Image: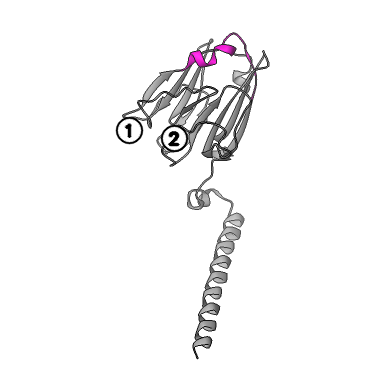
């Protein structure tokens, strides 16, 4: 993260698959679903994008979409960042959904001129219906880039239980498995009790 502090942005590109014919630009935010690549004046790069493991990852190099994303579109979005192109980055705050996988759920880019841009990866966003929703699909995480501090309510990226079970410590796995088993037993006993009561009423 410290490697980009003090750098200036010279080019920004969005990558999208869904809504391929529509514009990603809205009044106060941008929307895209595959990735973002930021190029700095010194030639270095920063990106967040979907890789061949089907989850978005953060890395400090140039984003290269995998070959099987055959219908993706690259969009030059540099003009959307024009307010900060002459200003260096003062800080980058990253909130991870799962840091071991370099999977962020929120990145806040802060610049020397006191402007900040916020990139969110959300399972569900616009929970308070405060912005237009350009999406017609709901599968997976997607990207919203907010050009001001008016961030709507959103739900962070989550993982299905079976995706991270093998990554958890053994103790955590046992606790989770026990919890799931206990819930199953309680539900089974509830069903059996209701069935017994219904039988007794019939008798």
For the residue pair 187 and 6, the one nearer the viewer reads as 187
Label 2: how many residues lie within 10 Å, few (<14), some (14-19) or many (20+)? few
Q: Farthest residue toward the top?
A: 86
- Percent across and percent down for residue 49 are 46, 30
- Percent across and percent down for residue 54 are 42, 38
Q: Secondary structure at mark 2?
A: loop
107 up-or-down from 178: above or below: above
Extent of the magenta region: 77-92
**Type of colouring:** one colour
Q: Secondary structure at mark 1?
A: loop
Please tell me which of labels 2 and 1 falls first in the chain.
Answer: 1
Label 1: how many residues lie within 10 Å, few (<14), some (14-19) or many (20+)? few
Label drawn at residue 68: 1
User: Mark 2 — residue?
Assistant: 135
191 up-or-down from 86: above or below: below
- Percent across and percent down for residue 46 are 52, 22
Q: Quadrant of the N terminus?
A: top right
Label drawn at residue 134: none
Image depth: mark 2 or mark 1 in front: 2
The answer to if 90 sits in the magenta stretch is: yes
Measured in 3D between alpha carbons, the distance from the residue under mark 2 to the one under mark 1, in whole angstroms, is: 22 Å
43 up-or-down from 106: above or below: above
The answer to if 108 sits in the magenta stretch is: no
Give the quadrant of residue 153: top right
161 up-or-down from 148: above or below: below
Q: Residue at x 59, y 29 (%)?
A: 107
One can see residue 36 in this view: yes
- Percent across and percent down for residue 16 are 40, 28
Give the quadrant of residue 81: top right
One can see residue 98 in this view: no
Mark 2–mark 1 contact, CB under 8 Å? no
């Amino acid at each position: 993260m410290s490697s980009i502090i003090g750098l200036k942005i010279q080019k920004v590109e969005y990558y999208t698959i869904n809504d391929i014919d529509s514009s990603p630009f809205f009044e106060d935010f941008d929307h895209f679903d595959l990735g973002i690549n930021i190029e700095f004046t010194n030639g270095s790069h920063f990106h967040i994008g979907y890789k061949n493991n089907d989850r978005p990852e953060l890395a400090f190099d140039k984003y290269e979409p995998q070959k099987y994303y055959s219908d993706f579109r690259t969009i030059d979005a540099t003009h959307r960042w024009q307010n900060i192109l002459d200003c260096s980055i003062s800080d980058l705050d990253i909130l991870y959904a799962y840091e071991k996988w370099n999977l962020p759920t929120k990145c806040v880019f802060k610049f020397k001129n006191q402007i900040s841009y916020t990139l969110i990866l959300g399972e569900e966003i616009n929970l308070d219906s405060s912005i237009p929703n350009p999406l017609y699909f709901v599968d997976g995480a997607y990207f919203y880039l907010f050009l001001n501090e008016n961030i709507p309510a959103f739900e962070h990226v989550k993982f299905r239980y079976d995706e991270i079970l093998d990554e958890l410590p053994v103790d955590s796995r046992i606790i989770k498995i026990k919890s799931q088993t206990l819930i199953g037993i309680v539900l089974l006993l509830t069903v059996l009790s209701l069935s017994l009561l219904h039988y007794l009423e019939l008798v």
